[in-house]
């Protein structure tokens, strides 16, 4: 279940990090991070795509409150969300890539399907 990992950070730092990661994921389509972070980012990104599918003023304002760049919100509502109109969830994929060289942390790529 999402939301249970503290990732070794205070709440405000953790939420700022996750907001930035969701923004980068929607902007670039894929990011490489640790498995634990990827599992936290996935549900948040899927919630933003679901807001984009609603395409109302309230959902746009809610997305603006979470995503840190206005251009990414515009891209979400105009390009990303319409592509998932026929899909009921499962917008992201996590692919494990093996341990990181420096500290042997399990790495993963999270990408939009």
Image: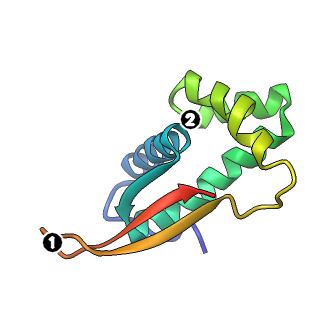
Q: Quadrant of residue 8?
A: bottom left
Quick check: marks 2 and 1 in contact, CB under 8 Å? no
Query: Whole-percent x and y of residue 82?
Result: 79, 40
Name the residue located 86 percent from the left edge and 30 percent from the top edge: 56
Tell me if I can see residue 94 in this picture: yes
Question: Closest to the observer: 91 or 54?
Answer: 91
Q: Which numbered disc, 2 or 1, marks the residue that appears first in the sequence?
A: 2
The quadrant in which the N terminus is found is bottom right
Provide the residue designation for mark 2.
67
Q: Quadrant of residue 73?
A: top right
Query: Whole-percent x and y of residue 103?
Result: 15, 72
Depth check, mark 2 against mark 1: the one in front is: 1
Query: Whole-percent x and y of residue 92?
Result: 61, 60
2 in relation to 81, above or below: below
* 70 sits left or right of 8 in the view: right
Q: Secondary structure at mark 1?
A: loop
Badge 1: residue crowd in 10 Å (few <14, some 14–19, many ≥20):
few
Question: Closest to the observer: 77 or 66?
Answer: 77
Name the residue located 75 percent from the left edge and 41 percent from the top edge: 81
* 97 sits left or right of 101 in the view: right
Provide the residue designation for mark 1.
103
Q: Secondary structure at mark 2?
A: loop
Q: CA distance from mark 2 to mark 1?
A: 30 Å
41 in relation to 102, above or below: above
């Amino acid at each position: 279940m999402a939301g249970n990992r503290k990732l070794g950070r205070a709440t405000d730092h953790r939420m700022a990090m996750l907001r930035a990661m969701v923004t980068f994921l929607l902007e670039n389509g894929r990011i490489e991070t640790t498995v634990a972070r990827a599992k936290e980012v996935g549900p948040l990104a899927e919630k933003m795509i679901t807001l984009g599918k609603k395409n109302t003023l309230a959902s746009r304002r809610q997305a603006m409150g979470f995503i840190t760049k206005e251009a990414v919100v515009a891209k979400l509502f105009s390009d990303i969300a319409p592509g998932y109109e026929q899909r009921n969830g499962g917008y992201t994929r996590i692919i494990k890539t093996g341990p990181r060289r420096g500290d042997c942390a399990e790495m993963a790529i999270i990408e939009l399907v």
